[in-house]
Amino acid sequence: MATRESMSHLIQQCEDAIRCAQEHYREGSLQEHYNNDDYTKALQGLEGTYQDICKMAQFANSQQREQLHRMRLQLQQVQNTMILQGPYQNTQILE
């Protein structure tokens, strides 16, 4: 079973990765140009966090796995939106 502290840390990491990706995406869209390095780093951050969730799920109990699953879905939604919309599109879908 995963410890409460490790779960809390991972959930915070997920929220931070999502927030960071949304901010980078929103900034680039408002300026009508985008720093591809920041865009790529934001997507890599989301992917790295996604992989961390998958690893943690192996050691989690059923309640923790459910919580991780919800976070994984949120990460995937932001990833998919960023990929499908591209760096130059409107940000309304991310909010």
Image (cartoon, helix red, strand yellow):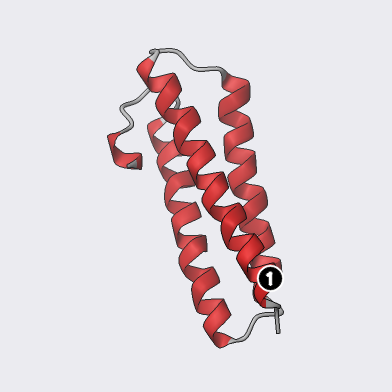
Residue at 48% of width from left, 53% of height from top?
Answer: 76
Residue at 62% of width from left, 48% of height from top?
Answer: 47
**Residue at the farthest front position:** 5
The N terminus is located in which quarter? bottom right
Q: Residues within 10 Å of mark 1 (few under 14, many from 20)?
A: few
Q: Position of residue 61 (x, y in %)?
A: 62, 86
Res. 56 image quadrant: bottom right
Above-or-below relation of 75 to 37: below
> In this figure, which residue is indicated by the disc labeled 1?
5
**Residue at the farthest left position:** 92
- At label 1, the amino acid type is Glu
Q: Position of residue 80 (x, y in %)?
A: 44, 45
- Is residue 13 toward the left or the right of residue 76 in the image? right
Above-or-below relation of 47 to 92: below
Residue at 40% of width from left, 28% of height from top?
Answer: 26
Res. 7 image quadrant: bottom right
- Is residue 11 toward the left or the right of residue 86 in the image? right
Residue at 38% of width from left, 13% of height from top?
Answer: 32
Q: Between 85 and 61, which is closer to the camera in this rendering?
A: 61
Identify the secondary structure beneath mark 1.
Answer: helix
Number of marks: 1
The C terminus is located in which quarter? top left
Q: Between 92 and 8, which is closer to the camera in this rendering?
A: 8
